[in-house]
Amino acid sequence: MLMFFYFYTILEFKKIAMSQLIITTDVSSIRPVFVEGTAENIKRYNQLKKLFENTKEYRIFAEPVPAGGQKVAWHTEYEGKIIPFRKLDEEEQEKAKGLLKTEVNKMYKTIVSLIDEEQNRKRLFELIDSCIEIPDFDDIYLVQNADGRKNFCLVRWGFINEDFNSPKHLIANLIPLQVATLNLRAIKGNNKLANGEKIYFEYENKTHDYTSNEKGRIFLEDIKLLTKITAYQLDDKQNKLYVQEYIVENDSEITFFIGNQGMPKQNVSVQTLDDFDNILTNVTIKIHYDDVEFTSDSNSQGFIELGELFVDTKVTCYQVKNENIIKTVVFNVQEGKNIYFVNVLKHKTSGTVKIKVIDENSETIPFAQIQVKYPDGTEKHFQADENGMLQIENMPFKEDMVFRQIIDKLPQFQQIIKFTDEDKIFHFKGKGVKTPFDYTKLTVEVINKNNEPIPNLKLKIENGIKSYNQVTDTNGIAEWKELDCSKKITAVVEYKEKKKVEEINCTGQETKHTIKIGNKVGLWWLWILIILLLIILGIIFGPKLFKKDVTDIVDTNNNVVVVDTNIVEIHKGMKVIVLDESGYKINNAEVSITYNDSTYTLKTDAEGEAVFEKLTDTNKFVTVVVKAPKFTEQRLTFKVTTEKNIILGQNSTEMSDLALPCGTMVESKGYHSTIQTFMMKKSKGQFKLLYDMFNIPDKIIVYQGPASKKSKDKIIWQSPDFESRLHTVYVNFESADSLITVEIVGGDTTKTEWYFRPNCPN
């Protein structure tokens, strides 16, 4: 046994070092429930940890770690202040009992939901019963984190006192075990809440009667799991009416229909059609009737099933696109009519999508090779640009598209993406596979015959079939971050109706190249010819010609003409190009420029450009204000130049009260904070929350109710702190309107990335 302790300690040391020690106890004076003592506790702990690895209920048991001799160190995965249950005052102990009951009973409920076979379920129930044996109430500890969240931990679990006639089942005597709470909602035949109604319940060979409150609710506390309950009402002759039966498997809401006998009820479906009665599929419709609301997409036959509804129920159908309602159709359920046609606006079934290819560190992968498999089995190959971006035409919407990255001629890193017609960038996570000298950073310097830099000159680089434009800076330099060395690289300079083309060879991970414009001519006779020409021109046009400076001649349109023997470049105003943070051009952005005490305002065209022809003096400063919907206003002051790129960041916060259906995945759109409401289908239960923060830590908070009503007192769960990477948690919720709200707070306002999905309750 000592050898077992030794190896266990070695194997678990790293994990335990990251947990919190509660207390070290001597177990020599207490008797283990399990035959093999502490070794058996360790075995049982690992068994419970595996059983509850998704829902984490095993954390109520402190982890036993041999501490030498007959001593055991008890550790907890919870973080926070450790408080003995005994040290709480009487009022706090009563509150703590309710929390302890919830935590302990979660284990039994999880077993019921996971295990169908009765004998296995009974065996696991007995295991939990044995594990929650403790010698004393001093073995119950409360762990409270910085946000006030309280959790319980048991030490010396699986042990009892050796004293004669010592008490057992301490926790079972402190709180009820293997129980659940039922929330019954009484509904009248017209689908309205029924208050003040007496309802009888038969279970465990007893009859109980309760009266529904003003919200039509009756709460049955501490009902044994798997209990069969019969609910009914009595008429004047004590005959049972509206008999309904339920099996208690978890904390849940049940509905009791009053007066449903004789009230017609039937299955109802809606079918989405266009104005020519052609069936439309995958149309997003929000359905509302009585106090029920949900959102669904029509199936391959255009149908959405509403289930059983009472006759005369008013149903409202909203066609939703990009979270906006674009059409509304209303009908009343008629007796004998099961299908209702909803004529909606025809939607696009395919279109252009943008994909950003990133690596495991969320960095872009330039020139990544991507394979796309379509629903019909067709495979196509695409290559990302130098910014890791793909733009694919005619992509089917609302279909599962399989993406893979081609590495060493093999498809890897599969990801399934379902596209919508929303205007956003989708992310594909692959792996950076660049090798030295596959790509190069290119720096080109453009100079004149006197080796002086030429600024504001347009320079084009052709790299295989792709081409990229840049304008030289004040030092005559233009840069390209990554060019493909496996393809031909050519530089093209155009000036005053002349073109110069030079091929560039990669020289490593960084390539530098100089282009000289206006090289000196080595022919002496050409100089003599030029001098003779100048003399003749001087005789004929001398007085007029030399009234103006040779190098800076101002024409009648106030355009500055730069003259040397090889270049004449006319400055004709300033071009403003408006881009988003991903480098895509923004059209219809408003650009206002203050220049010479005057303000000029233009809208950008389809290329994101606005040209201000009157801005000619490069020695003067201008103030530019750029506005665009969904982007943060940008204000800049700089000297006039021929071309200026202005990048707009997206707004810092996005909030939506329009409820998405549970199970919908929400991805980062670049906002610092995103707040989204979800319809959970139930008013109470537990759901699985999946979220991935990648490498930049973010924080996630879950509230009950809609986004517009969120507040600190409505928080039902939040991440312990800003977290990175992938997580799965299980969250209990209770919301009268069946709504919850999820908020993401970004750890970095410029490049945070995440996604999350609250699954529907079981």
Image: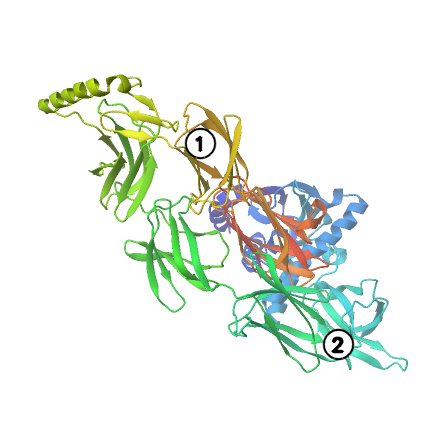
* Residue at x 25%, y 39% (from the top left corner): 492
Could you tell me if the residues under marks 1 and 2 are in contact, i.e. CB atoms within 8 Å? no
Secondary element under disc 1, as helix, strand or loop, is loop
* Element class at badge 2: strand
Residue 244 numbered mark, or none: 2
How far apart are the two marked residues, 1 and 2, measured between alpha carbons? 82 Å
- Give coordinates of residue 152: x percent, y percent: 67, 49
User: In screen coordinates, is 79 left or right of 264?
Assistant: left
Relative to 501, residue 368 above or below: below
Outermost front residue: 540
The numbered mark at residue 472 is none
Residue 513: percent from left, percent from top: 24, 32
**Vertical relation: 344 (above or below) 168:** below
Q: How is the image coloured?
A: rainbow
Q: Is residue 330 placed above or below 679 in the rendered structure?
A: below
Amino acid beneath label 2: Gln
Judged left or right of residue 371, residue 516 is: left
Residue to which mark 1 is pinned: 614
Q: Earlier in the sequence, mark 1 or mark 2?
A: 2
